Structures are given as C-alpha cells and as structure tokens.
Amino acid sequence: MVIKLEKPVRPLPPKQSRYGPDPDHIKTRTCDLENIVSVRVREFFRDIPESIYPSERGIKAVREATVNALANVDMSMIKPENSVNILGSHHGFLLAGGEPYAEMLKAIRDVIADKTGSENIRLRCGVGLRFRESDEYIRRFGLDEYFGKGKAKGVAPIDEGISIETEIGTLYGIKRCYDTDWIVHAHNSDVREIHFHRHVDKAVKPFGMSYARIETRSTYHQNLGPRSANFVARAIFNSELVQNKWTFATFLKPTPAGIAGVDADNDLFALDERLTIQNFRHYGKILSLLSQIDECIVVLDFQAPIPYVFSAGMIFANFSAASVDIFDLDYPLPGYTWYTEAFYGKDDKPLIPDTPPINPAIKAMVINYAWGGYPSVFWAKMIPTIVVGEHQAEVFEKDPQNIEFMKHAVVAKDLQTAIEFTTRIADTDKILIFDGATEAINVSKPLAEELIEKVSKVDEEVEQKLMPKWCRQRGIKIEKTI
C-alpha cells in the first residue's frame, strides 16, 4: 500500500477565549516549520468513512444528516404546549471548529418545532472546569439568537442542583437541565475520555458529568474512580426523574478523519452500542497506530486545555495513556486512570506500585498554543516541557488550576527555538503535532515514515484480534462488528 506524504494541513486559526492567550500572539504554527508533512487519515485506514464535513457540501451536509437521522425518531410525547430542553456539552464545540455541532443543535431545534408544534425549546450546554466556556460558544455561533432571548444558556456544575433519586441513592443534577417537560440528549461520539469511561456506557456518561452537579460528577475524578463511576451515570439516566422526561438522543459522529454523520434514537443504549462498534473500528485503529511510536516530541498547538488538544481525532490525554491498550478492560489495573495526579502521592510517585507510567514514548513536550482551565501541572512534572512565549506562560501563571505549572517548565522565545532545543534534549527528530488538523495528521517526516511502515500490521491486528476482544468484554455480539 502506497501512502502519500503531503504538505502540512493548516489547522484552524486561534480563537479568542478567556481561557487562552490572545490569538494575535500566535504568530507561527507548528505546521509552518521545515520537515513537517501531513498524512491523510484515510490513507492510513481506507475503511474510515468519508466525511460529510469538511466536504464540498459544507455545513449544509450536517443539517441534512441531522434531519435524516431524526426522520424515524418518535417525538409524539412532545405536545405543542410543552417545553423541551436540548442538553448539550462544551466538548462538541471542539470538533472541527465547533460549527458542525452548533448546526446539529440548530437542526434539532427546528425539527422538534416542525414535528411537534412546540416553540418553547431551550438549549442547556454543560461544561467541566471552565465554567463560562459554553457561554462563549453560544455567543460565537449565534445560538442565543437562534433559540431566542434567554433560551440558550451554559450550565456549570456549581449551578443550583436538583436531587435525583436513583437505585444507588440520592445523586444531584443541574436544575436548569431538568426544569422542563422533556429533555433531548445532544452529544457526540468521539472517544474523548476513554481513559476515564473506557468506552463503557460512553453515550450515557454526560448524565453523570455535563448535566450533573459537582458533588456527583466528581465521582469520575475522585470519589469512586473512573471505572466504578460508570454506573453513576447509568443510575441517573435510569432514574424516574430522567425517564419521565426522556425523549431521544442525537449524536454527531466524528471519526479520526472528520465528521462522518449524525445518528439518533429513542433507545440510548442501542445508540451507544452502534457508536461503540464504530469507534472500536476507527478510533481503535488510529490509537493503536499511535501507540506503536517508540519515541517522539509532542507539540501542542490547538485551542483547548492540555489534555484536550487533538491529533488525528485523538486527544493528548489518550496518547498520554497509550503505553497500554486503554480499550482493553482486562489490562491490569482496570479501575485506574494512570496519567492523572489523582493516583500519585506528594512525592510524585504512584500510590499503587503497578500503576502504568505515562506513555514513555513522549520524550518532551512543546506548548505553542493551549488553554488553561484544567489542572495540568502533572504533565509538566512528568515530561520535560517547553512553553513558547511569555504570553502562553501567563496563561498558566494566571490560571488558579495551574499556578505551579511554570515551576516545572521553561520558556522559549519562539517556536523555532523551542523545537531546536527540544530536539537536542530529547535526542529525536520525530515530532507528533496536536493541532487539530482536519482529515490529516501533521508530523515530522521521520515519524510519518515510521507510522507508514507499521500501519498494515495494526490494521490487521485491530480487525482480527482487538475488536473481537473489546466487543466481548462489553457484551457486544461479534457479528455486529462486521
């Protein structure tokens, strides 16, 4: 199989945000450097579906896909006099610049209004630790105007709560998510935090995170640990309060190559199974390929906090944990997430000796462009870190969650200097760039050649060995993967 090396695909331009540096300071992107090339993701894996976005049809393709997906969804429970809350999440706006997710939300609103006659349709977009992030997206994409005055709001885990009686006791949601007759679950299917949910009930997860009060959502990060916390989201979803308001779910379907479509269903668990199979086949291959990298310098160059910067559809947090197969539920500490400080003591050593290390292939990290708003000091402690420019250093210094970050990192005056210095200290010319380049992966030429050499073996292993195992572990019938 011949795989072409292309000129670097240019990432999206920097976005203005209270959580990141002024875009005017981002003068050079990593793709501008010498010896950087692109490989189209579908050149690596030809069975990844073609994208509807980006495509020649543009954003219209996302609206058409949403309308088509909703054609057979039952909305008969919604009456003209009823109110409806479309529940969304900030994570959807990090995909392909955010426009596809915003268009899906608009289309859902329009289809509901058309099919049911209801005009009291609101948008509630949850966030994690950046409490005003969804508000920024709502304004950026005109959702406040589209839904009508006061009907589109970001909701944060510190907002007023509502008690939810579940089979495991009282848990807490965000009141504004449930102050309605009916709810619609509008999310996306990218694997994102597989280091937490391990693709168990992934489609259900927002009920324990984006729509939950901080006391409940913290079970993922602290109280119970990631794997044990999976049943918290399921318990909330199965509760009487949620089920009495439940209508349907609509999911944007990204792949490592772009947005492939939209899926919708009244049955959330049926939808979850379909998305799981698709993600094993597509994201499973790209993550398995990246896990074959023996050494590299990572460059972060995307409008998101450190763990959420993208490369070939995968976030840096996934690559940080790629020293093991994070889809494999048997690997050897299935209850633990090994890249976070939650499992390390004050001496920066694992609390449990068998905790796998952060991916040893990461020899150094350059931060050209990234946001604050997520506790990230751990990475700077574990990986030699070079931050490009005082403007980027100030992001961490002024961030309450990262006030000690720069104690463990150094500042380079510009990107070229940072790369030259990092190449010397890491003793490698292999560079993996997390810049969110759509449809492609930007890397240095030596790393591209290494990935091309290994891709055939990875493709076969995922199809023949890993996918059947991952499915069996989750009770998915193997024939459904074909």
Image (cartoon, rainbow, N blue to C red):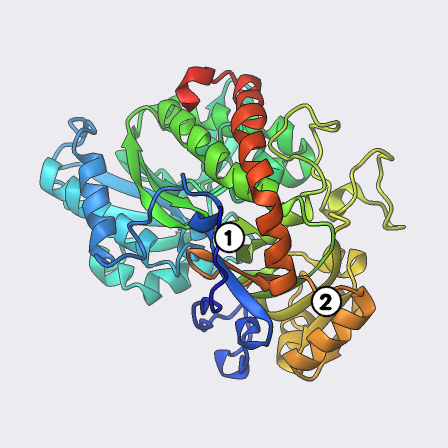
Residue occupied by mark 1: 312
Residue occupied by mark 2: 403
Q: Which quadrant of the rendered structure holds the C terminus?
A: top left
In the displayed structure, 35 sits above or below 215; it is: below
At a point 60% along the width and 32% down the height, the residue shown is 327
Query: Tag 2: Cα neighbours inside 10 Å, few (<14), some, or many (≥20)?
Result: some
Query: Tag 1: Cα neighbours inside 10 Å, few (<14), some, or many (≥20)?
Result: many
In the displayed structure, 142 sits above or below 192; it is: below
Viewer-side residue, 99 vs 12: 12
Image quadrant where residue 70 sits = top left
Give x and y (percent) for residue 66.
23, 43
Q: CA distance from mark 1 to mark 2?
A: 30 Å
At a point 28% along the width and 26% down the height, the residue shown is 266
* Direction from residue 70 to residue 244 in the image, left or right: right
Give x and y (percent) for residue 146.
21, 58
Query: Which circle's residue, 1 or 2, is located before the other in the chain?
Result: 1
In the displayed structure, 409 sits above or below 137; it is: below
* Direction from residue 474 to residue 145 in the image, left or right: left
* Direction from residue 38 to residue 104 in the image, left or right: left
Task: Give, as a three-letter code, the residue at label 2.
Answer: Ile
* Direction from residue 132 to residue 382 in the image, left or right: right
In the displayed structure, 178 sits above or below 429; it is: above
Q: Are marks 1 and 2 in contact (CB under 8 Å)?
A: no
At a point 58% along the width and 21% down the height, the residue shown is 469
The answer to whether residue 189 of the structure is visible from this angle is: yes
Name the mark nearer the viewer: 1 or 2. 1
